[in-house]
Each structure stands twice: as structure tokens, then as C-alpha cells.
């Protein structure tokens, strides 16, 4: 077990978002978190990565209590997430984005501009990451000028540049055409093997990708774990599938299982 969530409760005032979520992630697993809008998926990712502190419950990573410690400290322990920084810093080039991840891991982030071009070790590692993500031919292109598919790859590549053991991805293919989604996932899986990523956790709405690439699927509904199983088992779980696809008449079934 490399990561665990233990009885996580999170609310905003009187509005409850997570209501006792528990699960474990093991090395070598690709786990997808699914559920309808409002199920608590993004809040859960924010709690797992220390961005939010739960009202109750604990999160452990490699036997460390990481509850609420924040993404910066967590990345130094070996866990990272994608933040869609491409949208925040659109004038950064591909290589600048990747170098920022490398520099952050090495503790040189504060000297970013001073060593951006002259640090040989940083440059070589950034080149390697760019090649793994098939972005080497676009190294000098500003993020805002990239096709949407390459923007998503760059976002993930900058997180991978931190060389984490576990990475969390919030909708890594959102806004990308159907024809590009499988390509992005295949590159992501290949990159994880080449860069020694031990486990991947993603929030994803595209069920073809979820069932095509996941080892396990965790289905959330109303802030609770409705199902935690393999893709084959999930397909046979009528209540969980019903909740995810949002068919009429499902809410009553799912609610009864969560009582």
C-alpha cells in the first residue's frame, strides 16, 4: 500500500461533500475515480494532495501522515498532481514549463530565470521529458499556441518532471477530441513506465478511457464510495454504472445502497 484515505469527511459550512471516503492504492495500479457531477471527485483529489484539509479523517502516503500538508511539501515526499498551469502561464514555452518542474524538484525554483538556460543538468533532464511526451519539436512554442492535445500533454509532463512515485491527474483528456484521447493516454502510460511512476490516480469522465486503461475504478456518489473494483466487476455493478451514466430512476437505487 502506497497511499490510503481513511474515513475522509469534508464539508463547506453545512454542505457536505465527502462523507467517510476510504480506500487504498497499491504500487503498480492505475486507478480511476468516477462519478456524476457533484459526487466529490475533485474535492477528494484536493484532499489527497494536501491542498484541502478534511474536517475528519487522515491521508497517508508511504506511512507518512500527509493530511493537509500542501502540494509543495507533498511533491518532495514523492507525490504530485497536474494543475493545468498551461492556462495560468500561457506565455511560457514548452521547455520553460518542463524546466520549472525539474527545478522545483531540485529546490532551485526560486532561481528559475537565473539558471533557466545555463544549468546543463536541468536542460538535459527537460529534454528527456520533452522527448518522452513527444514535445521535443515544439520546445520553443508558447503554451498558448499549442493544440489542445499538446496543452494537456504539457500539463502532465510538467508534473511528471517532478519525478513523483504517485501522480494524480484531474481529467487529463478534458477538452481533447476523441481521436486524440487514446493517444494521450498511451503516451501517459508509456511515460509512467519510463520515468518510474509507481501508481497513477485519475479523475476521468470518458468511460471508454476509464474501462480501457484502469486496473481499478472507484465510483463516488453523494460523497461516498459506491463501488471499488476492477473494470470487469464495475460493468456488472448495475447501481454504480447507473449512477455514473445518470440514467433516470437510478438515484433511488444508489441512495438505498448508501444508507
Image (cartoon, rainbow, N blue to C red):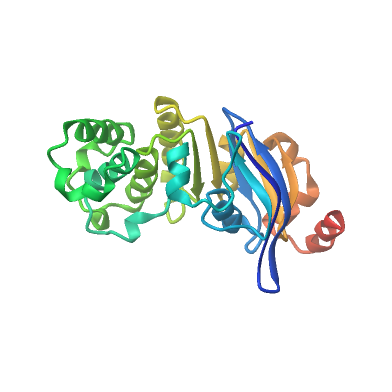
Which corner quadrant of the image does residue 184 belong to? top left
Instruction: Residue 244: tell me if it is visible.
Output: yes
Nearest the viewer among 236 and 114 is 114
Instruction: Look at 16% across and 36% down and name the residue there.
Output: 119
Q: Quadrant of the C terminus?
A: bottom right
Instruction: Look at 70% across and 74% down and name the residue there.
Output: 14
Instruction: Residue 205: tell me if it is visible.
Output: no
In the picture shown, does residue 171 fall above or below 3? below
Residue 62 appears left or right of 81 = right
Relative image position of residue 222 (x, y in whole percent): 73, 61
Instruction: Look at 34% across and 44% down and name the residue there.
Output: 158
Relative image position of residue 240 (x, y in whole percent): 75, 50
Q: How many marks?
A: 0
Relative image position of residue 23 (x, y in whole percent): 70, 42
Nearest the viewer among 83 and 60 is 60
Nearest the viewer among 30 and 50 is 50
In the picture shown, does residue 19 fall above or below 236? below
Instruction: Look at 66% across and 54% down and name the residue there.
Output: 35
Q: Quadrant of the N terminus?
A: top right
Direction left: furthest residue: 118
Relative image position of residue 76 (x, y in whole percent): 43, 40
Amino acid at each position: 500500500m502506497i497511499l490510503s484515505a481513511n474515513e475522509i469527511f469534508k464539508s463547506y459550512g453545512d454542505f457536505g461533500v465527502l462523507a467517510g471516503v476510504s480506500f487504498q492504492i497499491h504500487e503498480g495500479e492505475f486507478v480511476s475515480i468516477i462519478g456524476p457531477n457533484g459526487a466529490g471527485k475533485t474535492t477528494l483529489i484536493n484532499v489527497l494532495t494536501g491542498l484541502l484539509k478534511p474536517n475528519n479523517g487522515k491521508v497517508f502516503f508511504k506511512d507518512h501522515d500527509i493530511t493537509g500538508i500542501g502540494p509543495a511539501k507533498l511533491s518532495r515526499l514523492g507525490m504530485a498532481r497536474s494543475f493545468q498551469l498551461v492556462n495560468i502561464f500561457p506565455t511560457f514555452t514548452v521547455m520553460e514549463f518542463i524546466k520549472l518542474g525539474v527545478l522545483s524538484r531540485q529546490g532551485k525554483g526560486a532561481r528559475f530565470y537565473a539558471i533557466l538556460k545555463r544549468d546543463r543538468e536541468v536542460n538535459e533532464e527537460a529534454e528527456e521529458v520533452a522527448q518522452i511526451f513527444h514535445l521535443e519539436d515544439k520546445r520553443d512554442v508558447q503554451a498558448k499556441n499549442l493544440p489542445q492535445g499538446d496543452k494537456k500533454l504539457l500539463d502532465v509532463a510538467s508534473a511528471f518532471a517532478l519525478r513523483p512515485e504517485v501522480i494524480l491527474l484531474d481529467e487529463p483528456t478534458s477538452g481533447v477530441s476523441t481521436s486524440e484521447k487514446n493517444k494521450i493516454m498511451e503516451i501517459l502510460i508509456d511515460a509512467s513506465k519510463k520515468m518510474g511512476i509507481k501508481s497513477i490516480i485519475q479523475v476521468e469522465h470518458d468511460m471508454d478511457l476509464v474501462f480501457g486503461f484502469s486496473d481499478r475504478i472507484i465510483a463516488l456518489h453523494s460523497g461516498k464510495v459506491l463501488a471499488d473494483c476492477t473494470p470487469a466487476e464495475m460493468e456488472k455493478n448495475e447501481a454504480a454504472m447507473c449512477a455514473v451514466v445518470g440514467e433516470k430512476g437510478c438515484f433511488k437505487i444508489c441512495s438505498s445502497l448508501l444508507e
